[in-house]
Structure formats: structure tokens, C-alpha cells
Amino acid sequence: MSGTSIEIKRVAGALGAEITGIDLSENLSNEVFSDVHQAFLDHQVIFFRDQKVTPEQQKAFGRRFGSLNVHPYVKGMDDHPEVMEIIKEPEDKINFGGGWHSDMSFQEKPALGSVLYGLEVPEFGGDTLFASQYTAYDALSDAMKDLLDGLYAVHTAEREYSAQGNSAQKRESMAIEQAGNDVPAYEHPVVRTHPETGRKALYVNGAFTMRFKGMSKRESRPLLDFLVDHCAQEQFTCRFRWQNGSIAFWDNRCVQHFALNDYHGQRRHMRRVTINGDKPH
């Protein structure tokens, strides 16, 4: 590493690393940013502790990687529409982000990455799990890889943000719109090639992937169920224990995540900035 004060420590075999020696409230030099960018590509999800960033500073960090997304269903902050406040009040039953998924895969150009900042985390619970989709793909048999290469799947928000969907459920401190009957659907490759690393990763998830191109939902179900289950096997994962001031930055092009809902009666307040990506290939 070129920045001598920066230290990177892996947290699991499949993915994840914690970085120390960086203050994300400051403008990173090109040299330090290059180190962070490389760590992001190498480890797929990177973590920072003891940070104190304003919404503007969080946006500034995200913009070093690309333009920022404004979520189509979740209202952002009044002065910062690109910043989502993800809040679960003690009386809320359903959390936001529960279940394995890749952010914004229901868009034509899904998210590159997400930067999540913990402002108020519960005394216990509320961890986030991450799963490497590189490793999930690599673990498949050659015959399964041959079957999946060239196959496309249909992604849409119609289920997750419908009236019955988990993400659209009412929460005391979040303004979320339900998806109507005109929700768009996009076809993405089941095996995605990462545009920066060139590595192959599985690209289906239980929240937004409905079926395979040219197949009905019923025909798609056996293989899709297998892949959704396979993607989140324990050996492909790491787990992050939040503290106030922690930041996680994950690569949605090769990572799925799952926010655990095991802190009932406690408050959890996070802020998320999402970086726009490109069309999967």
C-alpha cells in the first residue's frame, strides 16, 4: 500500500476487509483514493470504523466512484435526495434490506456500490451479512457454468415494492412508495462479468429476480431456487458487527447482502448513498 498509515485486515476467507488509518470526512488524495479503490476491488466489501461524516461528506466519497442514485421508491433526505435514511424504530416489525439481495438490480443500469453509515446502532443485533458472488460462481460445476453462461434473467421491483412486499411495508420514520402496475423489468445476464476485474459472478437474487428470459415463472423456479440458495452458502459470506460511526462499502456487481432483523424494541438509524453503475454484461 502506498499510504503508509493505511492498514487493511481481511475479515473472512471469501470477502471483506477492514481499513484503518483513513478519515472519510476529509478529501482523499489521489494516492489514498487509489489504495481504497484497489482494496474495494480486491475484497468486494470494505469496512471503516470510528467515522464521523455529514451527508455531504458521504456523498463526496461516493462521487469519487461515480454519479449517485436517487431511489425511485424510497424518499431521500429533503436537502440530500441521494441520501437514504434507513431507520427502524423500536415499534417497527419489518426491517429494510432483510433478505439476500443486490441493490437496485431491478434497474437497467444497476448500482455499482453502496456506502452505508451507521449513526445509531442497537446494543445487540442488526449485523449485516455479505456474500461473494465470485466465490459462488467459482464453486459451481463446469456443467452448471456451461448451462448458465449466456442465460438471462428478468429483474423487477414488482414483488419487493408491491403492497405485499417487505420493502414497501410502512415504517414509522421512512417514506416509501409502493410499486404500481407499470413497474419496468430488465434482463440481466445470470453470469455477470465484472467491468473492472474481469471476473465472473452470479447475478440473481431472491428479491428482484423473477424468472429466466424466455421461461415462465413456474419453469424457472427449480433452477432459480437452487441459485438463490447456493449464492448465500456460509462459506461465501462474511458478517459485519456495526458500531456507531462504522461504514460499509460493498460492490453490488459481485456481492449480495442481508440486513439481520434481530433487534426488536431497539432503534437503528443508517444513511445510505448508492453509486450508479453500468449495464451488466
Image (cartoon, rainbow, N blue to C red):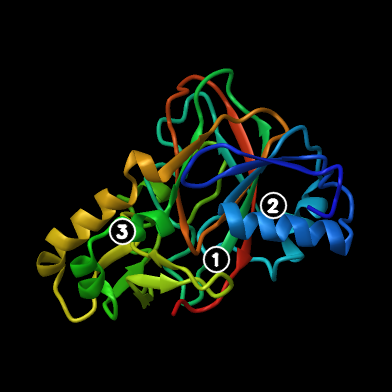
Q: Amino acid at mark 3?
A: Arg
Residue 263 on image: x %, y %:
47, 23
Judging depth in this view, the residue of 265 and 144 nearest the camera is 144
Task: Left or right? Give the position of 257 relative to 6.
Answer: left
Q: Residues within 10 Å of mark 2 (few under 14, many from 20)?
A: few
Q: Residues within 10 Å of mark 3 (few under 14, many from 20)?
A: some
Q: Earlier in the sequence, mark 2 or mark 1?
A: 2
68 lies above or below 195:
above
Q: Amino acid at mark 2?
A: Met
Residue drawn at (27%, 51%) of the image: 230
Residue ID for mark 1? 111
Q: Amino acid at mark 1?
A: Ala
Mark 1 vs mark 3: in front: 1
Q: Earlier in the sequence, mark 2 or mark 3?
A: 2
Q: Considering the image in quadrants, where does the C terminus appear?
A: bottom left
84 lies above or below 73:
above
Residue drawn at (40%, 54%) of the image: 135
Residue ID for mark 3? 159
Judging depth in this view, the residue of 199 and 64 nearest the camera is 199
Mark 2 vs mark 1: in front: 1
Q: SS class of the residue under badge 2?
A: loop
53 lies above or below 133:
above
Q: Residues within 10 Å of mark 1 (few under 14, many from 20)?
A: many
User: Would you say the residues marked 1 and 3 are in contact, meaning their CB atoms lie under 8 Å apart?
Assistant: no
Residue ID for mark 2? 77
Residue drawn at (25%, 49%) of the image: 229
Badge number at residue 178: none
Label 2 to label 3, Cα distance in Å?
A: 25 Å
Q: Earlier in the sequence, mark 1 or mark 3?
A: 1
